[in-house]
Amino acid sequence: MKEVMLAKYGELALKGKNKSQFEGLLLKSIRKRLLKFGDFDIKKAQSTIYVIPASEGFDIDAATSALTRVFGISSVNRAAVVEKDINAISKVSAEYLRDELASADTFKVEAKRSDKSFYLDSMQIASQIGSEILSKFKNLKVDVKEPDVRVVIEIRDYGAYIHSGNIRGAGGMPQGSGGRGLVLLSGGIDSPVALHMAAKRGLDVVAVHFMSPPYTSPMAQEKIRKISEKLCDWVGRLPVLFVSFTEIQERIAKYCPDNLSTVLMRRSMMRIAEKISAKERCGAIITGESLGQVASQTLEALICTDDATSLPVLRPLICLDKSETILRARQIGTFEPSILPYEDCCTVFTPKNPKTKPNLREVIFAEEKGNYLEIESEVADNYQVEIFRY
Ligand code: ATP
Ligand code: MG
């Protein structure tokens, strides 16, 4: 029996004149992501992408699940494909969904006919297939409201497709359709979720991680690697830039009043991120900050942080509760590595009483003593790059 995958896109279909450009990016993402599962062909028609296995060993299970994590796809169907003949469709439907039908109590047939030249209408298709199934599976009754199994028949231009309903896709926009952004990736729970949300809206992402050896352990870097591998399930490829932040933190500890040190550290991160963004062609900085979560995430503190860069700072989690973020982290698979115990540079240098409402003038004044800019330029020129791949 020949099987294919149908990927449908939602929001993208609304893109009017730019639609073909978006479709091109989506096809490119799909091609790259499925590469490792074997040979396949791709075609598109009627807001659907057809992925057709072209080699014996093509791993359709793994490929279907990978497709559900490509941004821009709203749903995926793994379907049997047959010629557009009602007898063939009946026979294959009963065979293809045999296991599901045999163990269910109720079912329903849904027919969709986008090829209007087909000789039966949707009602006629559904009733004919329904009778065939009822005659073969004595355990089954029809339930149109809440069936255990759906038998979906789609009569399309290229053939008839049989499946048991949609598998939800990742949604969002195709990668790269929204430009490129630099994500500050800390190793905590929040920033990996922020990266996922930004990438979902079409940003190509590059991550930067600040580390402060020997205050931070090599295990903290290892933790970032584990998180990055998980994120590749969604973004396919992720460059991670490791920046040494030790000297800056030592200077802040030496020259800055303790209660302002976190704000100064965040401003320094922003300036370095801006410099790196110029080299990496990124047009925005993305963080995992959420309003009011800690002292550095009050409105006053965020104003001081934003002042350090002219790039837009995107904060996808700004209005999420921690519990909502944790739920997302679990869904995308980053929660487990994120709760590994190794501490990053922020945690190591956390002051006892950070100021919750810093004032920009006093912050700039405190910054003048440390002479940070020169070291920041040096740091921004000397980072270590690791590329992670799906
Ligand atoms: P997270 O859970 O992402 O660590 P957080 O709640 O611990 O966030 P902070 O430690 O204040 O909050 O960090 C806020 C944001 O600053 C992080 O979400 C991340 O985007 C960025 N950031 C913090 N520390 C680092 C780091 N060591 N390297 C890169 N980015 C960082
Ligand atoms: Mg953190």
Image: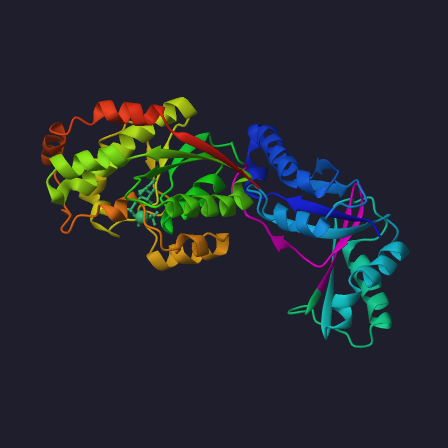
Applied colour scheme: rainbow
Horizontal arrangement in the rendering, residue 31 relative to residue 140 (left or right) = left
Residue 176 can be seen in this image: yes
Q: As drawn, is 115 to the left or to the right of 168?
A: right
**Who's the residue at 86% across and 66% down the image?**
132
The span shown in magenta is 150-174
Q: Which residue is located at x 67 percent, y 38 percent? A: 35
Q: Is residue 86 above or below residue 267?
A: below
Image point (72%, 36%), residue name? 42
- Specify the quarter for ligand 1: top left
Residue 320 image offset from top left, x and y in percent: 35, 53
Quarter residue 212 falls in: top left
The spot of residue 275 in percent (x, y) is: 33, 25
194 falls in the magenta region = no
Q: Is residue 83 left or right of residue 278?
A: right
Q: Nearer the viewer, residue 379 or 162?
A: 379
